[in-house]
Amino acid sequence: MKFEKKSLKFLEKYLNTSSPTGYEHKGQEIWMDYIRPYVDKIEVDHYGTCYGIVNPDAEFKVVIEAHADEISWYVNYITDDGLIYVIRNGGSDQTIAPSKVVHIHGEKGIVKGVFGWPAIHTRTNQNEPTPKIENIFIDCGAISKKEVEEMGIYVGCMITYPDEFFEMNDRYFVCRALDNRIGGFMIAEVARLLKENKKTIPFGLYITNSVQEEVGLYGADMIADTIKPNIAIVTDVTHDTTTPMIEKKKEGDQKCGDGPVVFFAPSIHHTIRELIIDTAKNKKIPFQRAAASRATGTDTDAFAHSNGGVPSALISLPLRYMHTTVEMVSKEDVGNVIQLIYETLLKIKPEMKLKYH
């Protein structure tokens, strides 16, 4: 599908706005502003999960869901000479940190810093340091702990990367935090298509952008109990396993550009998954298959295991270089995920049988 200018403008603004776990509110405000014309009602829970509702009075409820948070760091310790040591907020990768510019979200606003690293001249092959949580540090140009604190930086301040959105070779979207604000973009586009195409659906649709996925699926866990849906369709990212140093025998065989990835796992409901696959086949939407042995590791698990069991399914988007600042997804795949969710929703009926067969 071809993306409209207003959609791409929203995507760029949304991705470029920091939305670290526990501090998702700025990104959520942008997301809510975008979906407002396409829904009947918007709600926000106590921890910041947002959802737009179409047909809020309907008894039968369907959720389409993504998560809004991005990985980041916390200030954990400030040395007497003004260097900052960190702990993770989510699955932040210490190996990419050295030489990266960071934004420290202090009490007086954003302060720039850098993850320092000893110069190659000072290292020897016999004693080559490896980046670890214990040895990576941020230099914000201060020479004392007092000066750091005068900048408004204290233990507990959030640290994010400022890397911004761009398109590569007219084939990929590239940015930090495509995991999983690209999901928030895709479900918002589904809401837009339903409204602009004047589609009537016979159920309540809850377009849900959850918080705190990166630290334990907590936002989805909370909102599932609030909404109490009858069906949940979750979208997240999964690994493009065609890049170097990934073992397909372990991680499966998924590729950017080959279509959405439909997952098979214990938390995936057979009926909903087969509805998605049948829709893809009938509408000639390319798709791939993947399996997860115990848990999907996504908000699907939280929805599936809530409220005595909610029939749930997962449509993933192949992504390169997960949890780095150069995450990449195929523009074509993004369009196909949007189309697959949209077409699947048009086939859901409240009277459909959801029992396992």
Image (spheres, grey):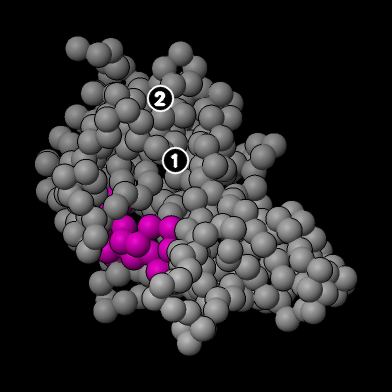
User: What residue is drawn where x is 44% and y is 78%?
Assistant: 124
**Residue 151 visible from this viewpoint:** no
Viewer-proximal residue, 84 or 189?
84
Residue 25 rendering spot, x and y as whole percentages: 65, 53
Residue 81 rendering spot, x and y as whole percentages: 78, 73
User: What residue is drawn where x is 53% and y is 30%?
Assistant: 221
Q: Cα distance, mark 1 to mark 2?
A: 12 Å
Residue 25 shows which numbered tag?
A: none
Residue 270 rendering spot, x and y as whole percentages: 23, 23
Vertical comparison of 226 with 5: above or below: above
Residue at image mark 1: 65
Q: Secondary structure at mark 2?
A: helix
Viewer-proximal residue, 240 or 127?
127
Q: Secondary structure at mark 1?
A: strand
Viewer-proximal residue, 81 or 262?
81
Quarter occupied by the C terminus: top left
Kind of residue indicated by mark 2: Ala
79 lies left or right of 253 = right
Vertical comparison of 307 with 49: above or below: above
- Mark nearer the N terminus (1 vs 2): 1
**Magenta region includes residue 213:** no
328 lies left or right of 110 = left
Label 1: how many Cα within 10 Å (few below 14, some 14–19, many 20+): many
Q: Which residues are magenta?
A: 317-337
Residue at image mark 2: 304
User: What residue is drawn where x is 65% and y is 47%?
Assistant: 22
**Residue 122 visible from this viewpoint:** yes
User: What residue is drawn where x is 16% and y is 45%?
Assistant: 249
Kind of residue indicated by mark 1: Glu
117 lies left or right of 323 = right
